[in-house]
Every structure is written in C-alpha cells, then in structure tokens.
Image: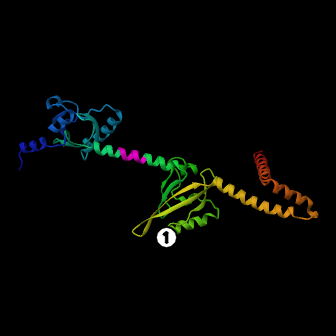
C-alpha cells in the first residue's frame, strides 16, 4: 500500500497543475506544475485566492459551476482563461470536494489541463464556418436540407426572409409552405422520387405561401444524400424566380396577343376597326401591353378603394 510520501511524490511529479484550496477559495497546496504555470513560488501562492478572474463574463460562469461543489455530486468542471508565464492560457479544471464527517465541505482539490491549443483550433473552425457561410449566403441560391419525412434540418436565413419567418419561428415541414397551385404536385413528385430512388431529379419550380399570405415562386435544384443505399436527407438550393415567372407569363400573353393581332390585321373591309387595332398592336406591342396592365392596375386600385370605403 502506498504511503503518504509516495502519494505526495506522485502529485509533485504531475505535469498537470494540481491545487488544494479552502471553501472560501484560498490556496492550501500547489504542486510544482502550477508554480511553473503561473511563475510564482509556493510561498507566494500560499493563502492567495484561487482562480482570480477579472472579466465578469468568466466570473459568472465559474461561480455558477463551482456552486456544484457544495451539493451532490460535489464536483464540477470549469474552464479558466488566466495569465501565465506563456501569456493567456485556457486551463480546464476538474474539481472535487473533500467532505468532513458532518457532510460539510472542508477543502477542494482540482487538477488542471492546458487546452489552449484545442480552443485555438475550435476558434479557427468557427471562423472558417462563418467565412464559408458568408460565401454561401452571398450568392443567388439559398440552401436547405430536410429529412425523408420533409422535416427541415437546415434553412438558409435568406429563405426565412423570403417566406417572412421571424427568427426561431416557422413550420417544421417544408411542405406546409406550399400553395394550392396544381403546379406544385409535379415538384413534390420529383422530391418523392429522389427520396425513393436515391437519384438526382431535374430542377423544378414551386409556389410557396409566405407568412404574410403572399406567394413566391422558387426554382429548386436538389440532390439526395444516400448512406448504405438509403436516402437519409435531401440537400438542395432554391432561387427566387417570382419576377422571372411574371416576365414569362407576360411574354406568353404577348405572343397570344400578337398572333391574334396578325389575324385581325389580315381581315377584310368588313372588320376595318378590328384590323386597325391589330395593326396598332403589331406596330408597338410593348406600348399596348403597358397600357393594358396600366388599366388593370387602375381598375384594381378603384376596386380596393371601393372595398375600403
């Protein structure tokens, strides 16, 4: 059985810092590794306050965790940024209370480990993720992913803006945002085929209903994520094509008008007025369409004013 001297020797030779302090936080013992860490002698550290923290955000976190030392399981883990001989270092402390016979805490022993390198790597990863997200969010496509059950895993903040969702709100199923437009059936069918087959489907368009009740058209380009021959997710991007759809509808309507105008312009003398109208449209189809939409807008405004009145 090891003697007290053997145990003390083991602690003294530890490369990680080991300390013992009172419930009030005064140091009772420090091993050489801790002295080396802070650049002070045992005599200088004896009776000094353990874990002196100047920044309130760290003090509040450490205080909250160390409360656990005075109730079961009488242990806690805290991270402390402290000034050392090597500059600011992050030390992860694992602390355990020593109890008196009456159950009161008589002392606390803590062992530390320098995790500065780990924290530096984590910070670099977070920085890289932010930069990557900035690049992703700067382009036209808006990215998302959902489960095979249509539950949203990730939604670009720009998609939430497009659908007018407030932060931390929104529906769980992306299908809940679909409008009643029959054109959505073809797009939903392609998603279901991709989930079932694990193969990519051609791009398609969907009409969504925003939180405010408006509608937007998006073009969807997605790919199934397959693991062990099973689709585990759908990842994709969408682009707002609402204005593009309006232009395409206008072009289609213009084509119909021009075809009709040619027929009117080629009519006989009995249809002189129709023929004149057809010739005017052919000479300036854009002006005709503009006047037509202007009339529509005026009519809509009059109707809205009538309804408000």
Q: Is residue 128 magenta?
A: yes
Residue nearest the viewer, comparing 228 with 203: 203
Q: Quick check: 282 above or below 72?
A: below
Could you tell me what secondary structure mostly forms the magenta stretch? helix
Q: Is residue 30 magenta?
A: no
Query: Residue at 62% across / 50% down in the picture?
Result: 212
> Which residue lies under the disc numbered 1?
196
Region in magenta: 123-129
Taking 225 as reference, is 18 left or right? left
Query: Residue at 16% across / 28% down in the picture?
Result: 44
Query: Residue at 54% across / 53% down in the picture?
Result: 141
Is residue 224 visible from the viewing direction of this image?
Answer: yes
Taking 114 as reference, is 157 left or right? right
Q: Quick check: 71 above or below 274?
A: above
Q: Where does the image place residue 191, in percent across and percent down from the top left?
A: 53, 65
Q: Where does the image place residue 90, in percent across and percent down from the top left?
A: 28, 40
């Amino acid at each position: 059985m090891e003697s007290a001297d053997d145990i003390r020797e083991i602690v003294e030779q530890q490369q990680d810092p080991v300390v013992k302090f009172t419930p009030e936080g005064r140091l009772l013992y420090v091993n050489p590794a801790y002295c080396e860490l802070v650049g002070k002698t045992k005599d200088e550290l004896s009776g000094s306050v353990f874990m002196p923290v100047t920044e309130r955000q760290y003090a509040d976190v450490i205080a909250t965790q160390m409360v656990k030392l005075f109730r079961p399981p009488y242990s806690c883990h805290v991270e402390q940024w402290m000034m050392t001989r090597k500059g600011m270092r992050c030390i992860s402390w694992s602390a355990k209370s020593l109890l008196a016979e009456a159950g009161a805490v008589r002392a606390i022993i803590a062992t530390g480990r320098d995790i500065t390198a780990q924290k530096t790597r984590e910070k670099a990863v977070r920085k890289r993720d932010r930069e990557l997200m900035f690049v992703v969010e700067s382009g036209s496509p808006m990215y998302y992913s959902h489960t095979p059950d249509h539950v949203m895993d990730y939604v670009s903040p720009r998609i939430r803006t497009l659908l007018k969702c407030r932060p931390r709100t929104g529906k769980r199923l992306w299908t809940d945002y679909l409008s009643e437009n029959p054109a959505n059936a073809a797009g939903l069918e392609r998603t279901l085929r991709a989930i079932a087959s694990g193969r990519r489907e051609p791009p398609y368009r969907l009409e969504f209903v925003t939180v405010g009740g408006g509608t937007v058209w998006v073009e969807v380009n997605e790919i199934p994520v397959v693991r062990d021959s099973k689709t585990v997710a759908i990842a994709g991007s969408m682009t707002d094509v609402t204005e593009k759809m309006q232009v395409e509808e206008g072009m289609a309507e213009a084509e119909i008008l021009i075809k009709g105008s040619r027929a009117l312009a080629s009519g006989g003398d009995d249809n002189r007025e129709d023929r004149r109208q057809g010739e005017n449209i052919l000479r300036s189809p854009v002006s005709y369409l503009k006047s037509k939409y202007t009339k529509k807008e005026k009519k809509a405004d009059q109707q809205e004013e009538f309804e408000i009145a």
